[in-house]
Amino acid sequence: MSAPAGPRVLRVLVVDDEPLGRRRVVELLGEAPDVEIVGTAADGAAAVEAIRRDRPDLVLLDVQMPKMSGLDVVQAIGPAQMPATIFVTAHDQYALHAFDAAAVDYLVKPFRDDRFAEALRRARRRIESESRDRLHEQLLALLRGGTTTPVPVATAATDASARPLERIAVQMRGRMRVVPVSQIDYITASGPYVELHVGTHRYVIRESMQHLEERLDPERFVRVHRSAIVRLDLVDTLLRGEGSEYQLLLKGGVRLRVGRSRREALERRLGRTW
């Protein structure tokens, strides 16, 4: 009776335009068992050439690269020919694209060694046990805008990026949590970050209020101050203070300031809502 075969060797291509980024991934792969690095690529064009030539099982693919992004690489190869992919990104907002695309996983820089190992394990499981057809269909859905709602990416289709957000990716201790927009009570600005208030929980992401305001559904959310956006169905009362100062009372008791330049627009919105 022959001995059972060991784990298959995973043939991996590393794509990152930053030398330090490539080196770190290569070093981590070097510590992993049953992994063969078939090559590295410093830009999208080289990645496309290497994928077609070397046919790796897995690609660790940087999303943000000049001239040709990671998503451009997927577009050039085509979903039916694209190997299993782990997207790598330096910005949280791009992670949701990878999550929705169900590329095997995503990594947000800087990532910890254990998070990398987890992504690699997940990749191996997916490659060995799941249908490649499912991966190809999900990548195709990503390129076409799909049925999911992605966070803006420079190379995303215009009609897809114009859709209101339905989920926001939040990086927490090396992991990503997806917060449904429908559960957000209000959003406040905190320097270069914004805070998503969901019940008693608070999630911090690096994003601008202007960008979020543009991506949120205007029928559900309204900006009441330069530092505050609220969900309309949680508004209880518009309160007038001293002089021309106004506050918004939300169901649950939270009070938020209303900017002078936004009060009239807010009143119109509330009139249409009630």
Image (tube, helix red, strand yellow):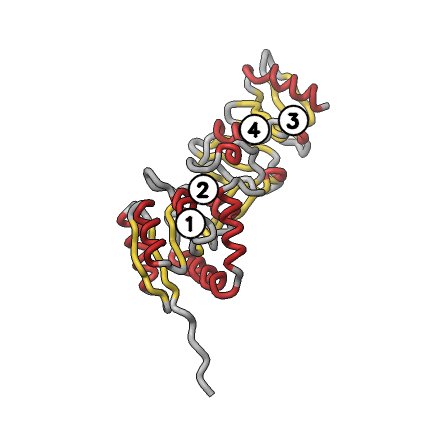
Label whose residue precedes the other's in the sequence (2 or 4): 2
Q: Is residue 42 left or right of residue 212?
A: left
Q: Amino acid at mark 2?
A: Tyr
- The residue that disc 1 covers is 87
Whole-angstrom CA distance, mark 3 to mark 4, is 13 Å
Q: Which mark is residue 120?
A: none
Q: Amino acid at mark 3?
A: Leu
- For the residue pair 222 and 126, the one nearer the viewer reads as 126
- The residue that disc 3 covers is 249
Label whose residue precedes the other's in the sequence (2 or 1): 1
Q: Nearer the viewer, mark 3 or mark 2?
A: 2
Label whose residue precedes the other's in the sequence (3 or 2): 2
Q: Amino acid at mark 1?
A: Phe
Q: Are marks 2 and 1 in contact (CB under 8 Å)?
A: yes
Q: Are marks 1 and 3 in contact (CB under 8 Å)?
A: no
Which residue is at a point 62% across and 19% down the rendered structure image?
A: 266
Q: Which mark is residue 229?
A: 4
Q: Amino acid at mark 4?
A: Ile
Name the residue furthest right: 274
Is residue 115 placed above or below 89 in the rendered structure?
below
- For the residue pair 46 and 17, the one nearer the viewer reads as 46
